[in-house]
Every structure is written in structure tokens, then in C-alpha cells.
Image (spheres, rainbow, N blue to C red):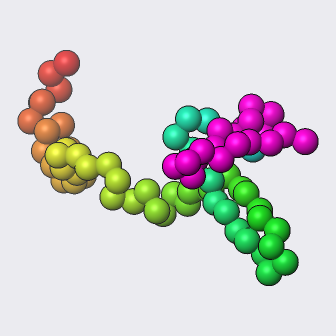
């Protein structure tokens, strides 16, 4: 059974076989759940796509169909 040593700062290194079993990579987060009987369950934290909404900002504005049609008409068959 893999084990890890707790540092004075409360940190541990997750053993390689555990990281592999959980599919963990650098920057991933872990969730800890302590059951009523004292058992600790550690899981790779799942991120819902809805929690990422608004995380990326862009200055590009949307284009309407009307604006696209104007550009097409303005091209006048050039091409």
C-alpha cells in the first residue's frame, strides 16, 4: 500500500501509482471527504463546464447575420 509523509507545512507528495490511478496531472485538484466513521475519501475534483463560464474574456464582438449579408452585398461578386 502506498504511503506519504506529512511535512511541517501540512504537505504530502502523492505517490506516483496513486496519481496514475486517479489520472492526476500537475495543477489538478483533489477533494477530501471525511466520513462519520473517520474514513477519508480522496477523489480527483471534477470541474463542471458551467463553473468555467466567464473564465475567458475576449474583446471580439459577435457578428449579426445582417452585418454578414451587408458585407456579402458590398463585395458585389468580387472574388
Percent across and percent down for residue 58 are 23, 46
Magenta region: 1-21
Tell me which residue sits at (52%, 49%) in the image.
9
- 24, 4: nearer the viewer: 4
Tell me which residue sits at (67%, 63%) in the image.
32
Tell me which residue sits at (82%, 68%) in the image.
39
Using the rendered view, name the quadrant where residue 60 is placed: top left
Direction from residue 27 to residue 74 in the image, left or right:
left
Tell me which residue sits at (12%, 30%) in the image.
75
Using the rendered view, name the quadrant where residue 16 is placed: top right
Res 12 visible = yes
Q: Main secondary structure of the magenta part?
A: loop
- Classify the position of the C terminus by image quarter: top left
Percent across and percent down for residue 71 are 14, 39
- Classify the position of the N terminus by image quarter: top right
**Residue 6: within the magenta?**
yes
- 77, 5: nearer the viewer: 5
Res 24 visible = no
| Figure check: 74 above or below 67 | above
| Figure check: 44 above or below 27 | below
Direction from residue 7 to residue 77 in the image, left or right:
left
Percent across and percent down for residue 38 are 80, 73
- 51, 43: nearer the viewer: 43
Using the rendered view, name the quadrant where residue 12 is placed: top right
**Residue 64: within the magenta?**
no
Percent across and percent down for residue 8 are 55, 48
Residue furthest to the left in view is 74
Residue furthest to the top in view is 79
Residue furthest to the front in view is 8
Direction from residue 72 to residue 74 in the image, left or right:
left
- 26, 38: nearer the viewer: 38
Amino acid at each position: 500500500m502506498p504511503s506519504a509523509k506529512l511535512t511541517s507545512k501540512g504537505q504530502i507528495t502523492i505517490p506516483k501509482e496513486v496519481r496514475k490511478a486517479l489520472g492526476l496531472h500537475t495543477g489538478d485538484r483533489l477533494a477530501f471527504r471525511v466520513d462519520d466513521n473517520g474514513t477519508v475519501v480522496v477523489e480527483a475534483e471534477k470541474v463542471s463546464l458551467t463553473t468555467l463560464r466567464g473564465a475567458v474574456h475576449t474583446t471580439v464582438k459577435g457578428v449579426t447575420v445582417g452585418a454578414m449579408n451587408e458585407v456579402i452585398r458590398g463585395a458585389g461578386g468580387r472574388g
